[in-house]
């Protein structure tokens, strides 16, 4: 398991973080993102919420990419990422029958993969606590 983690940690953090950074479009182009990415009707009253969410998720991605190169950041960043991404998957799954969830399917698939990989990462730390 440790060999798998060692081989995959940088690519997972860089690619997964890069995909997560894409949520930043919500921060900078909120109307475009809501209508074209999330496939939702634009509600101007939600602008601040959408932008705040977008920058928070974008920064999560930036920190994931940084953690690929700064080993001491990995545990806290991956723990936060695991919780955030698992919760996003939970939200999409519990709202599968709703039309508003369809714009979140692709990010949810990525989040499932990162969540599963993160669980393997933390399991490998338990087996090799010195890592």
Image (tube, helix red, strand yellow):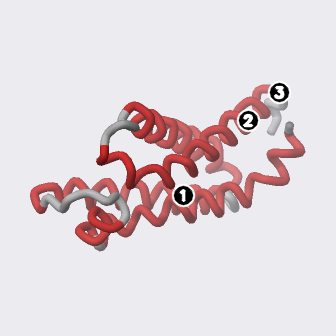
> Judging from the image, what secondary structure is the residue with disc 1 in?
helix
> Judging from the image, what secondary structure is the residue with disc 2 in?
helix
**Image-quadrant location for residue 59:** bottom left
Q: Which residue lies furthest to the left in this view?
A: 45
On the rendered image, what quadrant is the C terminus found in? top right
Q: Looking at the image, which is closer to me, 24 or 99?
A: 99
Horizontal and vertical percent position of residue 47: 18, 61
Q: Distance between the residues labelled 2 and 3?
A: 11 Å
Answer few, some or many: residues within 10 Å of disc 3's Cα (few below 14, many 20 plus, some between 14 and 19). Answer: few
Horizontal and vertical percent position of residue 108: 50, 47
Residue under numbered circle 3: 127
On the rendered image, what quadrant is the N terminus found in? top right
Horizontal and vertical percent position of residue 71: 70, 52
Q: Are marks 2 and 1 in contact (CB under 8 Å)?
A: no
Q: Compare marks 2 and 1 and give the one earlier in the sequence.
A: 1
Answer few, some or many: residues within 10 Å of disc 1's Cα (few below 14, many 20 plus, some between 14 and 19). Answer: many
Residue under numbered circle 1: 63
Q: In this view, does 73 lie above or below 61?
A: above
Image position of 34 (left or right of 113):
left
Residue under numbered circle 2: 120
Q: Looking at the image, which is closer to me, 109 or 15?
A: 109
Residue at the image position 63 percent from the left and 56 percent from the top: 67
Q: Do the residues labelled 2 and 3 touch (CB within 8 Å)?
A: no
> Judging from the image, what secondary structure is the residue with disc 3 in?
helix
């Amino acid at each position: 398991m440790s060999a798998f983690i060692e081989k995959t940690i940088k690519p997972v953090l860089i690619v997964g973080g890069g995909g997560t950074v894409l949520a930043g479009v919500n921060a900078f182009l909120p109307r475009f993102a809501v209508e074209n990415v999330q496939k939702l009707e634009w509600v101007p009253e939600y602008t601040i919420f959408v932008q705040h969410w977008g920058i928070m998720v974008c920064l999560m991605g930036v920190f994931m990419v940084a953690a690929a190169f700064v080993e001491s950041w990995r545990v806290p960043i991956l723990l936060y990422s695991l919780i955030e991404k698992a919760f996003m998957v939970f939200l999409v799954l519990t709202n599968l029958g709703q039309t508003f969830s369809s714009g979140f399917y692709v990010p949810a698939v990525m989040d499932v993969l990162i969540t599963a990989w993160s669980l393997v990462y933390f399991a490998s730390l338990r087996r090799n606590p010195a890592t």
